[in-house]
């Protein structure tokens, strides 16, 4: 079974631009969660989607948004990029039989903002 | 508030030594789950174990073992006879029953195993 895939793997943008990251979950998984990883703040939860609905959201500004499609694939968008948005963005998928089902992570997208 | 603390920032051992990674958590939930993930240099978080709050039995999987003690809110991870391939960052995480899809991670412990 294929794992979680994320595209692109690397991205370089400049301040003020916007970016869209994509995540394809493991086949059959219905929940997708997104996390931001930085050296200073560690791993922080962005949001979680299930059946095309956002069920939970972390403490990030409105510039960070996401969506989920009917095939469970998910995208996250960051508008008006800031230098501090440079990070590894990880998505994770789970079966979501329970709220606390195991999350399996993709390889991440490394975003650099210049 | 929920919190996970991994007090050891970096650990360095020589191959074949045993090493224990500490994890202490805080939660008011009565039902919760604890996890360990491994992050090699490639960046992907690799799932190692999931344990629920009602199951305090220790678990062993090959060279890996986990000790869950509810009384001290700890979920420690031991690698026996460490190998160079064990070098990675290890994260402990908490998932509360009321927090849909949200893992709360510790800051991670970087383990370096030298040959």
Image (cartoon, coloured by chain):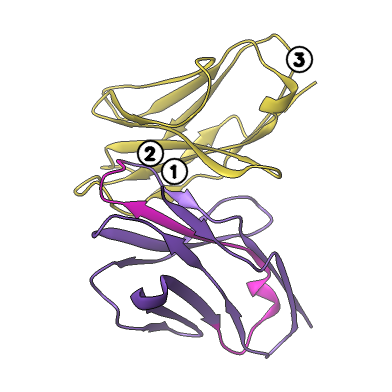
Chain colours: A yellow, B purple
Q: Residue at 57%, 88% (x, y): give it.
A: B80
Q: Does the magenta stretch include residue B88?
A: yes
Residue topped by disc 1: A4
Q: Which of marks 1 and 3 is nearer the N terminus?
A: 1
Q: Chain letter of disc 2?
A: A
Residue topped by disc 3: A14
Between marks 3 and 2 in the image, the one whose residue lies nearer the viewer: 3
Q: Chain letter of disc 3?
A: A
Question: As rendered, which of B112 and B76 lies closer to the eye?
Answer: B76
Q: Give the range drawn in magenta.
A: B79-100
Give the left or right position of residue A28, taking residue A16 as reference. Answer: left
Disc 2 secondary structure class: loop
**Whole-percent x, y for residue A10 in the image:** 68, 32
Residue topped by disc 2: A25
**Whole-percent x, y for residue A57 in the image:** 39, 29
Between marks 1 and 3 in the image, the one whose residue lies nearer the viewer: 3
**Whole-percent x, y for residue A58 in the image:** 44, 32
**Residues at circles 2 and 1 in contact by the CB criterion of under 8 Å:** yes
């Amino acid at each position: 079974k294929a794992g979680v895939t994320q595209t692109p793997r690397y991205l370089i943008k400049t301040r003020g631009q916007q970016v869209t990251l994509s995540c394809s979950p493991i086949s059959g998984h219905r929940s997708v969660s997104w996390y931001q990883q930085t050296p200073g703040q560690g791993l922080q939860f962005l949001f979680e989607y299930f059946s095309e609905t956002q069920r939970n959201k972390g403490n990030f500004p409105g510039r960070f948004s996401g969506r989920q499609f009917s095939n469970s694939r998910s995208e996250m968008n960051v508008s008006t990029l800031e230098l501090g948005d440079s990070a590894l963005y990880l998505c994770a998928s789970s079966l979501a039989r329970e709220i606390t089902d195991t999350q399996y992570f993709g390889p991440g997208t490394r975003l650099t903002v210049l | 508030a929920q919190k996970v603390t991994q007090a050891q920032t970096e650990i360095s051992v020589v191959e074949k030594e045993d090493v224990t990674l500490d994890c202490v958590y805080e939660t008011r939930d009565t039902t919760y789950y604890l996890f360990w993930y491994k992050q090699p240099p490639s960046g992907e978080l690799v799932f190692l174990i999931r344990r629920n709050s009602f199951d305090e039995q220790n678990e062993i999987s090959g060279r890996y073992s986990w000790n869950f003690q509810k009384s001290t809110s700890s979920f420690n991870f031991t690698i026996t006879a460490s190998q160079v391939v064990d070098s990675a960052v290890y994260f402990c995480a908490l998932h509360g029953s009321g927090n849909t899809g949200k893992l709360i991670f510790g800051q991670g412990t970087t383990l370096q195993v030298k040959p």
